[in-house]
Every structure is written in C-alpha cells, then in structure tokens.
Amino acid sequence: MSDVQIAAGSFITKNARISTNGIELAYTECGRGEPLVLIMGLGADRHAWELHLAAFAGAYRCFAGDNRGSGESSAPDGPYSTAQMADDYAGLIRSLDLGAVRVVGISMGGAIAQQLAIRHPELVSKIVIVSSWGRVDDYARAVFEQLRVARGTLAPADFARMLQLLIWAPKSYDEKADELVASRSAEPTVAARGFVAQADACIGHDVIDALGSISVPTLVTVGSRDVFTPVELSQQLADLIPGSELKTYDGLGHAHHWEQLERFNSDVLEWLE
C-alpha cells in the first residue's frame, strides 16, 4: 500500500507499507540506481536516516524501513529477534523484486544485517555493519538490560538524555550540546513496549558460530570511544567474517555515523561502489 509521493530535491520520495512476515513494514524509497537497504537501530525509526539519505540517494535507490515495533510499522507483542526482523526485510526485498541488495545497518540494524546475510545470502551483495556486535558480552548485556528498565521508568526527555550520553563521544557531545538538548523534546518514535521487545532482540542476538558463512564483501565500522557496544565487539565481527574490513573512527562514539556525518557518508559510498 503506497501513501502519497512527494518531491524531495531532484528525487521522488515514496512512503509505503508492505505486508511481510506477519506484519506491516513501513518504508521510504528515494533516489535512483541499484538498491540499497538501510536498517536503523534500537529505538529509532526510518527518519533517523535522513542525513544519510541526502548523500546516498544520489547514487542508489534507497529503502529505509521502520523496524517492527518502530514508527509506522506493526508493533506486535515481543520479544523480537534479529532473525525475525531479518526475515521482515527479506520479505520486503522479495516483494519489491530487488534482487541482491547492498545493506547498511546501524547498531541493532547491523545485527539484523548479519542475520539477513546468514539466512538469505541470495538477497545480499554487500554489507556495512555500523557499531554492532555478533554476540553481547556481559557489559553490553547489562547496558541493554538497563535501557529496558530505564525506558519504562524515566520521562522521555530524561531517557533521551541518558541515551545521548551513551552514544555520543564527549567531544562530539560538547560540540552539539544545544542541538542534542533541543532534540529531547521530540516524541519517542518507539513506544515502550516496542523498545523493550527490540532490546530483547539485541540481547538475544548470537551469530558467532554463523559469521564464517557470510561470503559477501563486508565493512565493519566503529568509534574508538564507543562505550555502548565497545570496539572489541566490532573487532570480533571483523575477525570472524571472512575477508571483512574494519574501519575505526578515532575519538568518536557509537554514533560516529552522525558525529562525522560527511566523512562517514563518503566512506560508505566509496566502499559500496
């Protein structure tokens, strides 16, 4: 089912929904060229891709989805799993007859991208895995468990502040402090129930024994100051995915893709060629 189409610069942006894997998955399509699927992380919807789409849509036909539990997609009872969400996107790719696509996934989206390549290898041609993990260690598990509690007990603005402190490196936080403070007043794009179900997917994600089966070109990116999912987890991904490349952004955090937006966008576009 398609909603209205609106002009976005020189591109047409189409907002639509598609039935897949027992849910309605909302997505935005924009740009031209070969298909690129963009999968966002925990607690965010597809609009979090806007600053990246401004660059990516000039080279690719982009599809940015709302994960189950987020935005305008269905939010069934949880817990969710990254395998389940990968199957959601596999249904999207097949329904739109996109063939093998490039995929960029951030944080939980990177975990979903791993599962997509493992479970549906014929649908993936290249992957960029951003600030992610193959299996949580005790520290990351504790972070996700605390986020589950905090999402249900803190006021939305207080929760947003806590999350910002986790994902932005100190220097980047200082540089964008006014902007970050202002953004805390925005309504959450994921209800508490959906957030908890997604957090369960993050905690349960464990593909360590299957990463060796990923045969497509893979780029793993991480900030050296990531205290949310520390650099060791990205290093493990790069070690276990054959032929993968690890790119570290010195002094940046979990949100390095926003902290140095132009550099990240350029790096990804160059690597995806």
Image (cartoon, helix red, strand yellow):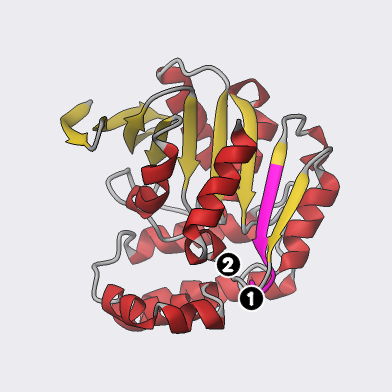
Query: Is 216 or 203 nearer to us in this picture?
Result: 216
Q: Position of residue 172 (x, y in %)?
A: 50, 77
Local crowd at mark 1 within 10 Å, few (<14), some, or many (≥20)? some
Q: Is residue 41 left or right of residue 183?
A: right
Tag 1 or tag 2, which sits nearer the N-term?
Answer: 1
Q: Position of residue 231 (x, y in %)?
A: 73, 66
Q: How many marks?
A: 2
Residue under label 2? 254
Query: Is 200 or 5 nearer to us in this picture?
Result: 5
Residue under the image location 75 percent in, 52 percent down: 246
Residue under label 1? 227
Residue under the image location 40 percent in, 19 percent down: 96
Residue 65 falls in which quadrant of the image? top left
Residue under the image location 32 percent in, 62 percent down: 191
Helix, strand or loop at label 2? It is loop
Local crowd at mark 2 within 10 Å, few (<14), some, or many (≥20)? many
Q: Is residue 7 left or right of residue 253?
A: left
* Residue 195, placed above or below residue 71: below
Q: Quadrant of the N terminus?
A: top left
Q: Is residue 166 left or right of residue 121?
A: left
Q: Assess whether residue 206 is covered by the magenta stretch.
A: no
Q: Which residues are magenta?
A: 219-227
Q: Is residue 177 left or right of residue 172?
A: left
Circles 2 and 1: CB distance less than 8 Å?
yes
Q: Position of residue 235 (x, y in %)?
A: 79, 58
Query: Is 40 or 252 nearer to us in this picture?
Result: 252
Inspect the image, locate mark 2, and give the three-letter code of the amino acid beneath it: His
Residue 116 can be seen, yes or no: no
